[in-house]
């Protein structure tokens, strides 16, 4: 009763959750302004799109992808042998357990009418599959511990999934080991199948089972007639019972719990463990759509979709957005992308996890689902997103076949639309005077070199610019200055920037067009008769600007985390600048 | 001759033909290209955080050192950035110590002995004109080429040490080896405008237009490039703004690796060459 009710409850939660997740694909929109179409339009898009592809010749490619990518998991093999081994063990171990053991009365009994769970080879195979899963989890866990390059790619949800899986298997083994030694089960079976209360008849069988099947009885059977016991066993039990030794793991475990067998039998541990075992299984089933387990559905779908329609590259139509939503759900957080990411080493200097693709994807997914992220988070996502060079390596490596490249481009566009562009974008929003004013109003206007571990501070060190003689050669050779006619003026020229530095007024240059429109062609530096590293200084001013202008960027954020007040329109605090 | 091939971030997705053609030409010249899993050179992040840029560059050089080879880049910006990092790592012991401390956790170490060379200087210095000339089977006779150096290979000259920054000749000489005719053009040392693409598109395109017009006025039929970013600017980005009538459309940009490959008689498919214009010019 409890079993049936909880099973159907878990199953309906599972189905409902899967439906929710899939409906989510049709509801995802990166930007509410995007014309992503109505829910009905998107759902019918999924349906007709799938039908169109499945009825075309591409179905051959999809079938090939099913074998190569899903059954043989070749993309994982490319990511590493141990990853593949672990995943194959877990996947096949678990799938076979579900089919042979959990659905034994339906599937196995269909193929083998004599099926009984306590009969070989099923008993042995069940242990083998369970051992495979445990081995896979062990390899995966060790790999996760070893593989971290310099960041933790393992999140709480990764641990939860591995833990649940291990719990299912371990509880199963424990249950079986307790069942092996269980006298109450023996008594009940004898009642059910022999139909006699006569201890004269039962005792030889009891003795036989105590010796050969390692059942632990509280009182020793009066008869030790093993020969009669064996005959009785062959008549009544042998058709359904192999020796417990073939359940190699559970049997070893039952030897270990042997000393406590009498107590376990008394408290009916077999019943409790049975509840626990199926309870955990049903919890896992119910959680499937809401945890990483969902990749069991999303990854094969994505790999086949990829084989069917190719990599999505330019999300333009509502169907493309649906496709991207499926891709985002196919992430298993395996961390392969971050291991190969071209800009991942930058994470060691700028400790923003959104630089790493495996972590950034979670933020981009939240963006796409229209979740409200706070300003700090959005700034971090923006920094990470615009550091990405779109080298395509993550997309090539992803074992789930996610076209991450497309997601990154889409994410960048969304961030620009939400007013979180790269520094070039937001610095341009104010004039250099306005920026200087903002900085001036910020009390805690401390120089950068104190707060930031900087190696080369060209713009901080007077030796680099004090030799400037204001000859204006830098300005004369500058292509950006030359292009000024009809363009936004550079506000200050390179030579004027040098002069501002000499006057210790570099705040007036930080937000200038000259600094941010510099093409870094180095003509000025090459031509400077005084050997001043003009371009290097302009570069450095950008570094300083990123650090110092970002906190005063949003006037709405009244108090900066450092306690820097930005709502001082009259500059009353000017004199307090340290 | 053996080099670790530093393709940079943009080639795999945005300009695969540069990788294809470079490999094909290097194979013909018997240059062994090793593929290591390099990270970004650090150039794109330099405007944000110089330390991150230097660390990125140092990690690449340390990776090449671990594999016992020198680096060949085909992109001026990668080249400039790697050279810049090497320059300061050599001169600043404090910086070197800190960067190496970070690298040590990956069992890597930066030392001065890793050389960074540009594809053009490998051809010019290591292979030499006479060796290249022997391989030229189909000279690109009559083709007038504006050789586009790219800023970060030339400057800052005391850091990159590529060629004379005011009057460089390497690229023109290499163009002449293919049988093509290099033209003299006033803006040959200026910026293509790409560093400002997606940052200030108007200015970026303005700089590009001036260069295209100048090359055309100087009688060039094509612009020869040897930098990923310059080529992307003159080719892919120019095509995205097709509605802008003020952009010169007649002059196309062709990668030097493709020009050299064509002169070697390599198949255009092996060079990733999809541009019909240059084929018409050569055959016509």
Image: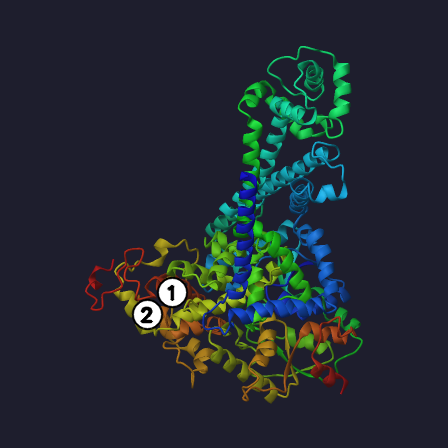
> Which mark is drawn over residue B2?
none
Q: Are marks 2 and 1 on the same chain?
A: yes
Q: Chain of mark 2?
A: A
Residue at position x 73%, y 60% from top? A63
Q: Secondary structure at mark 2?
A: helix
Q: Secondary structure at mark 1?
A: helix
Residue at position x 72%, y 28% from top? A241
Which numbered disc, 2 or 1, marks the residue that appears first in the sequence? 2
Q: Which residue is mark 2?
A: A435
Q: Few, some or many C-alpha atoms within 10 Å of disc 2 (few <14, some 14-19, many ≥20)?
A: many
Q: Which quadrant is the N terminus of chain A positioned in?
A: top right
Q: Chain of mark 1?
A: A
Residue A236 can be seen in this image: yes
- Quarter assignment of residue B13: bottom right
**Where A337 sits versus A189, above or below?**
below
Front-most of A332 and A204?
Answer: A204
Q: Few, some or many C-alpha atoms within 10 Å of disc 1 (few <14, some 14-19, many ≥20)?
A: many
Percent of width and height locating residue B6: 63, 61
Task: Work out how far the residue at label 2 is from the one at label 1, CA to CA, in angstroms.
Answer: 10 Å
Percent of width and height locating residue A560: 30, 59
Front-most of A155 and B245?
Answer: A155
Do the CB atoms of the residues marked 2 and 1 lie less than 8 Å apart?
yes
Percent of width and height locating residue B98: 48, 49
Percent of width and height locating residue B217: 59, 89
Residue A339 can be seen in this image: no
Q: Which residue is mark 1?
A: A545
């Amino acid at each position: 009763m409890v079993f049936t009710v909880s099973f159907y409850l878990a199953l309906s939660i599972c189905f409902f959750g899967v439906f929710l997740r899939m409906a989510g694909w049709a509801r995802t929109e990166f930007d509410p302004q995007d014309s992503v179409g109505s829910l009905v339009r998107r759902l019918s898009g999924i349906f007709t799109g799938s039908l169109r592809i499945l009825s075309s010749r591409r179905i051959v490619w999809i079938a090939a992808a099913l074998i190569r990518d899903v059954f043989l998991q070749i993309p994982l093999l490319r990511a590493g042998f141990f990853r593949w081994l672990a995943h194959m063990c877990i996947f096949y171990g678990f799938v076979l357990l579900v089919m042979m053991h959990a659905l034994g009365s339906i599937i196995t009994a269909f193929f083998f009418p004599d099926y009984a769970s306590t009969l070989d080879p099923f008993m042995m195979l069940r242990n083998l599959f369970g051992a495979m899963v445990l081995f896979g989890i062990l390899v995966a866990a060790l790999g996760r511990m070893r593989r971290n390059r310099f960041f933790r790619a393992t999140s709480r949800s990764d641990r939860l999934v591995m833990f649940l899986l291990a719990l299912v298997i371990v509880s199963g083994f424990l249950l079986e080991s307790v069942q092996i030694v269980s006298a109450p089960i023996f008594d009940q079976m004898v009642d059910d199948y022999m139909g006699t209360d006569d201890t004269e008849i039962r005792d030889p069988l009891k003795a036989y089972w105590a010796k050969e099947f390692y059942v632990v009885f509280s009182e020793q059977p009066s008869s030790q007639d093993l020969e009669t016991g064996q005959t009785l066993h062959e008549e009544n039990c042998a058709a359904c019972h192999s020796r417990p030794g073939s359940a190699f793991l559970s049997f070893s475990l039952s030897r270990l719990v042997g000393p406590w067998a009498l107590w376990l039998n008394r408290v009916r541990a077999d019943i409790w463990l049975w509840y626990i075992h199926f309870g955990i299984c049903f919890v896992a089933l119910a959680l499937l759509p809401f945890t990483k387990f969902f990749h069991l559905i999303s990854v094969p779908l994505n790999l086949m979709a990829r084989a069917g329609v190719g990599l999505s590259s330019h999300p333009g139509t509502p169907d493309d957005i649906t496709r991207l939503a499926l891709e985002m759900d196919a992430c298993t957080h395996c961390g392969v992308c971050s291991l190969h990411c071209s800009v991942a080493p930058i994470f060691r200097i700028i400790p923003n996890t959104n630089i790493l693709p495996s972590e950034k994807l979670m933020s981009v997914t939240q963006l796409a689902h229209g979740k409200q992220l706070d300003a700090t988070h959005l700034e971090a996502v923006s920094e990470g997103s615009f550091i990405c060079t779109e080298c395509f390596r993550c997309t090539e490596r992803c074992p789930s076949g996610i076209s991450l490249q497309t997601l990154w481009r889409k994410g960048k566009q969304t961030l620009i639309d939400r007013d979180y562009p790269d520094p070039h974008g937001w610095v341009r929003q104010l004039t250099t005077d306005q920026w200087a004013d903002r900085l001036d109003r910020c009390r805690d206007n401390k120089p950068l070199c104190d707060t930031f571990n900087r190696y080369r501070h060209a713009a901080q060190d007077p030796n680099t610019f004090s030799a400037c003689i204001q000859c204006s050669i830098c300005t004369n050779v500058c292509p950006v200055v030359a292009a000024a006619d009809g363009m936004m003026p550079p506000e200050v020229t390179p030579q004027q920037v040098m002069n501002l530095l000499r006057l210790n007024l570099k705040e007036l240059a930080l937000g200038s067009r000259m600094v941010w429109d510099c093409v870094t062609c180095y003509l000025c530096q090459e031509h400077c008769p005084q050997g001043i590293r003009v371009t290097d200084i302009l570069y450095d001013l950008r570094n300083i600007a990123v650090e110092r202008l970002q906190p005063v960027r949003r006037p709405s954020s009244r108090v900066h985390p450092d306690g820097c007040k930005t709502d001082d329109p009259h500059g009353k605090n000017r004199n307090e600048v340290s | 001759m053996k080099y670790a091939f530093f393709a940079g971030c943009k080639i795999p997705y945005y300009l695969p033909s540069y990788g294809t053609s470079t490999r094909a030409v290097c194979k013909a010249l018997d240059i062994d290209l090793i593929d290591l899993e390099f990270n970004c050179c650090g150039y794109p992040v330099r405007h944000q955080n110089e330390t991150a840029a230097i660390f990125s560059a140092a990690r690449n050089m340390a990776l090449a050192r671990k594999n016992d080879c020198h680096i060949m880049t085909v992109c001026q910006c990668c080249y400039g950035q790697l050279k810049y990092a090497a320059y300061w790592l050599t001169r600043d012991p404090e910086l070197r110590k800190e960067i190496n401390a970070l690298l040590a956790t990956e069992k890597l170490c930066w030392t001065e002995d890793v050389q960074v060379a540009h594809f053009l200087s490998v051809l010019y210095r290591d292979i030499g004109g006479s060796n290249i000339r022997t391989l030229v089977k189909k000279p690109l006779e009559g083709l007038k080429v504006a050789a586009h150096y790219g800023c970060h290979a030339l400057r800052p000259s005391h850091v990159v040490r590529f060629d004379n920054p005011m009057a460089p000749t390497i690229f023109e000489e290499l163009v002449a080896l293919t049988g093509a005719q290099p033209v003299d053009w006033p803006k040959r040392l200026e910026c293509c405008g790409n560093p400002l693409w997606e940052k200030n598109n108007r200015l970026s395109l303005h700089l590009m237009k001036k260069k295209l017009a100048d090359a055309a006025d100087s009688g060039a039929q094509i612009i020869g490039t040897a930098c990923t970013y310059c080529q992307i600017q003159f080719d892919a980005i120019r095509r995205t703004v097709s509605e802008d009538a003020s952009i010169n459309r007649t002059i196309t940009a062709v990668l030097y690796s493709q020009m050299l490959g064509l002169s070697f008689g390599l198949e255009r498919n092996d060079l990733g060459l999809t541009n019909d214009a240059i084929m018409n010019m050569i055959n016509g």
